[in-house]
Image: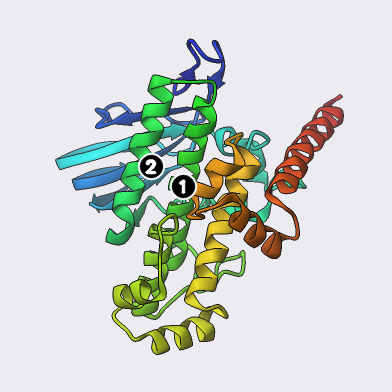
Amino acid sequence: MQHITVGRKYNEGKVAKIECVRNDRLQNIDIKDKCFLLIILTVGKLEFKVENEQFCAAAPAFICFDETADPVLISKQKAQYTCIYFHPEFLNVNMSFEMLRKKEYGDIASTHDLFLLKPFTDKAYVVPIAETQLEKITQAARAMQEELQNQRDWYWSCRGRSYFMEIIIALERMYGLIGYGVTHQKSDNTPIIKNAKLRDAVLYIESRFDESVTLPDIAKAAGMSHTTLTALMKEELGLTAIEYLMKYRITVAEKQLEFTSVPIKDIANMTGFKTVQHFSRVFKAQTGETPAEFQKNAVQKRKDDLNGKQNSRA
């Protein structure tokens, strides 16, 4: 595989199947049968041709290509962007292109993990980025690139995956909220939000979930009163704004616990909790397990899945 990051001083020789490049030349793009390509376009326009179809992406936007794509760059217009080349294995060690195509997932990954890659497998190509999300996405991309390049300690790969998860989750949410590729309802039963102001509220929550967010902040961002916001949230999502915030924080935390080795106290801080104790209480209330129990069970599940996969090949 061409696009990889190899450990140097720490975890020497370790291969992380991901590469992050800012303002890559994007000439003679060769990703077929090797990796997915995610482009985060922050400024300008990029014009591509894929499978005899020509399209233009205007910033801010995600551009998504799966491993079967053969994209040809037609033009750049004052474009600034970050390219992330990755194998699904970097997201989930048990994932492969073959499994995604055959949809033979078994117990290897949860339904949500699979939907994280739907913008690629659905050939969405261009997914607009909400302005409220852009800064957080670009910060995560810069942080991921720094971790992969500098490799400052033994956790460089874990931290890189952690920032990558932030980006992929944001992509999946943008894709779902605007209804791309799916008619009216996402297959994981998350409703498409049609009310524009409510969508603004949700995007505000998801772009600032790691900050001290209050109901007045969310209502102001959505341009509506506290009462109206609460009523709309309950009607369309079945949750209040703060309940949605907590649920989203825990969803992000689950992915970090499941697929990284980042310490629990760091995950608590990264997901907006001021103390590990508060994080643990909310996490257990929503999942039935403490963060430590969830992480331990997730690691054991991956080992069991991997052993089952190896035994089936024997």
Q: Quadrant of residue 98?
A: top right
What whole-number distance in Å separates the C-alpha atoms at marks 2 and 1? 7 Å
- Asked if marks 2 and 1 touch (Cβ < 8 Å), the reply is yes
Q: Residue at x 27, y 59 (%)?
A: 131
- Indicate whether 113 appears above or below 31: below
Out of 80 and 210, give the one closest to the viewer: 210
User: Left or right: where does residue 277 sit relative to residue 289?
Assistant: left
Q: Quadrant of the C terminus?
A: top right
Out of 150 and 40, give the one closest to the viewer: 150
Q: Secondary structure at mark 2?
A: helix
Three-letter residue code for mark 2: Ala
- Indicate whether 116 appears above or below 25: below
Q: Residue at x 50, y 52 (%)?
A: 271
Residue 178 in view of the camera:
no
Q: Quadrant of residue 71?
A: top left
Q: Residue at x 43, y 46 (%)?
A: 167
User: How is the model colour-coded?
Assistant: rainbow
Q: Quadrant of residue 208?
A: bottom left
Out of 166 and 177, give the one closest to the viewer: 166
Dot 2 or dot 1, earlier in sequence: 2
Q: Secondary structure at mark 1?
A: helix
Characterize the local packing of mark 2: few (<14), some (14-19) or many (20 or more) Cα atoms within 10 angstroms: some
The residue to which callout 2 is attached is 140
Provide residue 66's location: percent of width, then percent of height: 47, 41
Residue 305 in view of the camera:
yes
Provide residue 303's location: percent of width, then percent of height: 78, 33
Provide residue 140's location: percent of width, then percent of height: 38, 42
Provide residue 53's location: percent of width, then percent of height: 32, 49
The residue to which callout 1 is attached is 166
Instruction: Determine the residue located farthest toward the left in the rendered image.
Output: 78
Three-letter residue code for mark 1: Glu
- Indicate whether 174 appears above or below 309: below
